[in-house]
Amino acid sequence: MAFDYKKEYKEFYLPKAVPTVVDVPSMNYIAISGCGNPNEVDGEYQRALGILYPVVYTLKMSYKTDYRMDGFFEYVVPPLESLWWIDKDGSNDFTDKSAFKWIAMIRLPDFVKSKDVEWAKDEVRRKKEIDCSSLDFFNLQEGLCVQIMHIGPYDAEPASLAAIDRFIESNDYVKDITASRRHHEIYLSDPRKCLPDKIKTVLRVPVIKKP
C-alpha cells in the first residue's frame, strides 16, 4: 500500500477545529513562487499549479521509468500547500488579493533530492514542452506554530484566524511572521469537487513564546 503522509502524520495534516500548538520539523518541497490573486482564472497562481503538478507526478511515477532514486517507495502525493504574505506597508490586510505574494508547494519524500527534481523538470520539459525553470527544491524549517482545521469557504478563514489570535494571546505566545516564517495553508479539499461549506484547510501561523 502506498505511503500516505496525511494518514501517517495526522498531527500536521489533520488538526482539530480548535487551535493547537505544533512543532513542525524540517520538510522538503517542490515549490514555485509568484504574486497576485489565486482565484484569478488563468492567473499566475493557477498557471503555477499547471507547472507544479506535472513535475510532482513525474517524480511519483519515476519507478516506472529507467530512473532510480535511492530509498524510493510508492507514496500518495501530499496535498497542495502555500505560504502567503503581503509586502505593503507591513499590512496584515489580506482582503486585497491582488497584493498577495505566495509560494505554492507540495511536500517531497525525504528520498527525493534536488538532482531528482531537476531530472523530473527535464522530463516534463522534454515530454510536455512545459517550461519548469521556475520550480525549485525548497526546504522549510517551520518550527513552533499554532494551527487549526478551517472548515468552510476560503473567504470565511478570518473567523478561524481570529480563533488562532485569541489562543496565541491567552497562552503567552506571539506571532513570529518573518521572511522565513509565513502564514501557511494546506489544502485538503478540491474546491471543484466539494461544497464550499465542506472545504477543509489547515491554517498555520508561526509563533514564539513571549519573552
Image: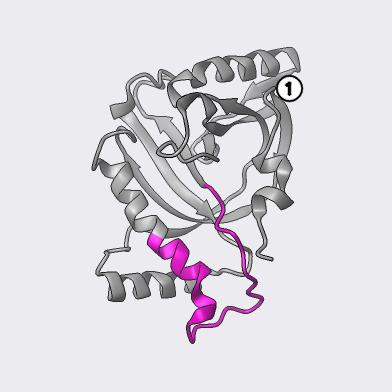
Residue 6 covered by magenta stretch:
no
Q: Residue at 49% of width from left, 87% of height from top?
A: 66
Secondary structure of residue under mark 1: loop
Q: Which residues are magenta?
A: 54-79
Residue situated in front as seen by the camera: 85 or 188: 188
Dominant secondary-structure state across the stretch colored magenta: loop
**Residue most toward the right?**
171
Residue 62: x, y in percent? Answer: 50, 76
* Residue located beneath label 1 in the image: 211
Q: Position of residue 116 (x, y in %)?
A: 49, 73
- Does 78 appear above or below 186? below
Q: Quadrant of the image for the N terminus?
A: bottom right
Q: Is residue 168 above or below residue 27?
A: above
Label 1 crowd bin: few (<14), some (14–19), many (20+), radius 10 Å? few
Residue reaching furthest to the bottom: 66
**Residue lying at 46% horizontally and 64% vertically, measured from the top left:** 57
> What is the three-letter code of the residue carrying label 1?
Pro
**Count of numbered circles on the image:** 1
Question: x and y percent of residue 41 in the render?
Answer: 25, 38
Compared with 83, 29 (above or below) is: below
Indicate the quadrant containing the C terminus: top left, top right, bottom left or bottom right. Answer: top right
Magenta span includes 62:
yes
Left or right, 60 with respect to 209, comes to: left
- Look at 34% across and 70% down and name the residue there: 124
Residue 70 visible in the shown view: yes
Residue 114 visible in the current orientation: no
* Colouring scheme, one of rainbow, by chain, secondary structure, one colour: one colour
The quarter of the displayed image where residue 172 is located: top right
Residue 137: x percent and y percent? 48, 60
Place residue 88 in its image quadrant. Answer: top left
Q: Residue at x 25, y 40 (%)?
A: 43
